[in-house]
Image (cartoon, rainbow, N blue to C red):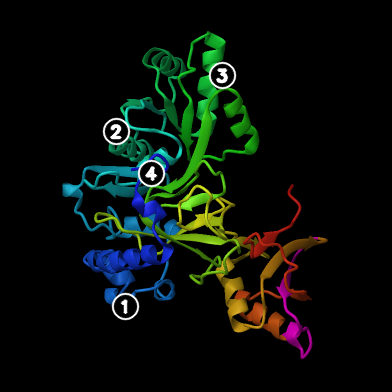
Amino acid sequence: MSADHYDSLETRDPAQREQDQFARLAQTLARALKAPGWAKHLAGIDPESVTSRAALAKLPTLKKSDLVALQKDSPPFGGYNVTAPGKAKRILMSPGPIFEIEGHEKDFAGVARALFAAGFRAGDIVHNCFSYHLTPGAWMFDAGAEALGCPIIPGGVGNTEQQVEAIAQLRPAGYVGTPDFLKVILDTAQKSGKDVSSLKRGLVSGAALPPSLRQELSGRGVDALQCYAIAETGVIAYETRAREGMVVSETILVEIVRPGTGDPVPEGDVGEVVVTSFSPDYPMIRLATGDMSAIMAGRSTCGRTNRRIKGWMGRADQTTKVKGMFVRPEQIAEVAKRHPELGRIRLSVGRDGEQDTMTLHAECGSSGGGLSDAIAQTLQSVTKLKGGVRIVAPGSLPNDGKVIADERPVG
């Protein structure tokens, strides 16, 4: 641990990181295949063959949105847990409900390095305002604070006046929780005349931190950074003092794929976040999170050498209903797959009179040779619905990851 970095992993050569992580991935895959869910999902996979991102991209994704049904079919964890429930430290539940298992691994969610990047140091008292009730958030941040050597005030959510009293008396150095609740605490303290000025830093997650709220918190003495985390893998990426996107955690492999597929998109393109973790208890292999982001070019000026993402940029599930039938992102991806000469494509769903309409906008350098008609036939074959096709210039469609845009008026 240095003054600027949590450990030497954060500043290692990127090529060395890839080598280290894929060596570790082979061990993780071998361990995961002992669980019946993974054995079925990854049937026929040789762990030793997954030695690169190209090889990883050939493995099937597991949709987070499918976990609810999978866990109901094979309770309690869908067969994706390596550690048996009776040997777990905690069994947790996220909305859905989706159940998760916490093992005995120190800092199981990788929160300590995110706390360090946000300015927390050993001996700093941390006021934890994530929920301790069933959900994993509070326990993830508890474990990270403990690993960093920070005493924890288990504030949880609600009881705002009591929490303000505790902060005024115990003088914690910083806050972890949602950014919205931090504002509630500061507002409550202001109204009651309580001194909560000891809060100098914060690590927030679980809700958006718009620039206006970040600026307000800063103006009131709290320097807040954010991290992007999910229950199944812990921290995926976190902000640093450079405030240039989010640095990917050293315990995670991140891919950005075209929504509806497992195919990686070019650097800079917006797509769905797919994550692979190395947990010995509850590993995740190519978990499709349903969140959108993009890989940023270059390295952070903070000195950390891992990849960066732009942060949360919306949801990948753009499924919509047209003329009573569902149209899904994976169907639009199939159209693109059958016409490899196309660049980005986007299906616009509109309304003409009292009828739903579909128009597929497709980037291509050439529009001759009956291309539009061929694409229209493919669109109808895949979706079972007729739609128009419009060929547009390469690079003219927005780089926002959207493959279905529902433009029908609301109300």
Mark nearer the viewer, 4 or 1: 4
Horizontally, residue 95 falls left or right of residue 40, namely: right
User: For numbered disc 1, what is the local secondary structure?
Assistant: helix
Q: Pointer 3: residues within 10 angstroms few (<14), some, or many (20+)?
A: few
- Circle 3 residue: 187
Which kind of residue does numbered mark 3 sit on? Asp
Mark nearer the viewer, 2 or 1: 2
Query: How far apart in space, not on screen, are marks 3 and 4 (Cα)?
Result: 29 Å
Residue 5 place in picture, x, y as percent: 40, 45
> Which one is nearer the viewer's eye here, 344 or 135?
344
> Which one is nearer the viewer's eye here, 309 or 243?
243
In this rendering, does residue 365 appear at all? Answer: yes
Horizontally, residue 97 falls left or right of residue 335, namely: left
Mark nearer the viewer, 3 or 4: 4
**Image disc number at residue 312:** none
Which kind of residue does numbered mark 1 sit on? Ser
Residue 228 place in picture, x, y as percent: 47, 47
Do residues under tags 2 and 1 come within 8 Å of each other at their CB atoms? Answer: no
Query: How far apart in space, not on screen, are marks 4 and 1 (Cα)?
Result: 31 Å
Which kind of residue does numbered mark 4 sit on? Arg
Which kind of residue does numbered mark 2 sit on? Gly
- Circle 2 residue: 149
Query: How far apart in space, not on screen, are marks 2 and 1 (Cα)?
Result: 39 Å
Residue 13 place in picture, x, y as percent: 41, 61
Query: How far apart in space, not on screen, are marks 2 and 3 (Cα)?
Result: 29 Å
Q: Pointer 4: residues within 10 angstroms few (<14), some, or many (20+)?
A: many
Which of the two labelled residues, at mark 4 and mark 1, occupies the earlier sequence position? 1
Mark nearer the viewer, 1 or 3: 1
Residue 243 place in picture, x, y as percent: 56, 44
Residue range of the region highlighted in magenta in the rendering: 354-373
- Circle 4 residue: 113
